[in-house]
Amino acid sequence: MPEFAVPANAVGAKRRSVVAKQVLIRCGRLIDGTGGPVQENVTLHLANDLVERIEPGIVGPPPPRPRSSMQRDRTVLPGLMDLHVHLVNGVTDPREPHILFGMLQSTTQMLTLWATRNVRLLLEAGFTTIRDVSSFMNPGNPEVLALRDAIQLGLVPGPRIVAGGWISQTAGHRDMFLPRNWVRDPEYLADSPWEVRKQIRRMVRDGVDLIKTSTSGGAGGHGEEIWWRNWTDEELAVLVDESHAYGKRVASHAHSAESVKRAVRAGVDTIEHGIYMDDEAIELLAKQGGTLVPTLAARSERAISHRRKSGSPPTS
């Protein structure tokens, strides 16, 4: 956890004033994010939330006197990034003991307020960029899209948000999270190449920044299995093609080795989780320049082992 983080233009609206807002941050230690050594006793000069230069030594503010922050006993580093968050998944009314019911009965307005709380906590923890990969309740992600825009307008504080929409087949990983008798919105399920294209076009129209999908089951739903295939090869190829046609990257939830390979061959940009990747999947991902977004806590080897011992699904 960082002791201090510099937003560096990550928070709030763009400044419209022609007079630069000057800030000095006097650092005891600075990690600049370039891979270089830690710098001791330096002063950061910021103008309109951007770092202009780094000056050796702890210097005093020149006239006209800018706002300054003394962090001589702290470590200063660039804002952190979290590339896989669900700002409205897992939030619930504390009066409702069952977390799933708590989420399903929450209104869009209440979920937006929960997400607003969550981004404030993330910002206070030093995260200045996050990528939200949607929720199983509202796959079009309207709550996070609104929050992203509100942060850009300076209405509420928070990190930069890259907001995704989640596209799923019937009985796909997102669909299986919902109870069996829950009424689905057919507009958010696609079961043919042209339905896939139409759903992506709707999400692009609604303002998503990326497309989230799944190429395996997740063992977190009602009866689904990790090895289940999501999408045919034709549907998956169309999903990537249509997303890239609009300049939208594709992130795929993929647990099994085969699901990773299928996603990479289709041109998916990032693999989410990838907990059962084999050597072939790793080599294929590296060869095609893909990116793995691992889940380091909930799906660590230790966590999986404990869940197996308790009789719970290993990756839920």
Image (spheres, rainbow, N blue to C red):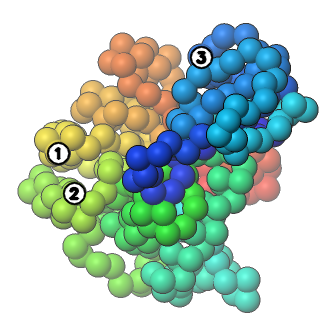
- Provide residue 110's location: percent of width, then percent of height: 54, 83
Identify residue type, mark 3.
Thr
Q: CA distance from mark 3 to mark 2?
A: 34 Å
Quadrant in the picture for residue 176: bottom left
- Give the residue displayed 63% in from the left and 13% down from the top: 35
Q: Secondary structure at mark 1?
A: loop
Q: Quadrant of the N terminus?
A: top right
Relative to residue 249, is residue 102 drawn left or right?
right
Q: Residues within 10 Å of mark 3 (few under 14, many from 20)?
A: few
Relative to residue 144, is residue 60 drawn left or right?
right
| Residue closest to the eye, 59 or 64 | 64
- Which residue is under mark 3? 34
Quadrant in the picture for residue 260: top left
Q: CA distance from mark 3 to mark 1?
A: 31 Å
Q: Residue furthest right?
A: 73
Whether residue 221 is visible to the viewer of this picture, yes or no, is no
- Which residue is under mark 2? 204
Q: Earlier in the sequence, mark 1 or mark 2?
A: 2
| Residue closest to the eye, 191 or 243 | 243
- Provide residue 132's location: percent of width, then percent of height: 47, 54
| Circle number at residue 246 | 1
- Give the residue displayed 21% in from the left and 40% down from the top: 247
Relative to residue 131, is residue 29 drawn left or right?
right
Identify residue type, mark 1.
Tyr
Q: Is residue 151 above or below residue 125?
A: below
Relative to residue 46, is residue 278 drawn left or right?
left
Identify residue type, mark 2.
Val
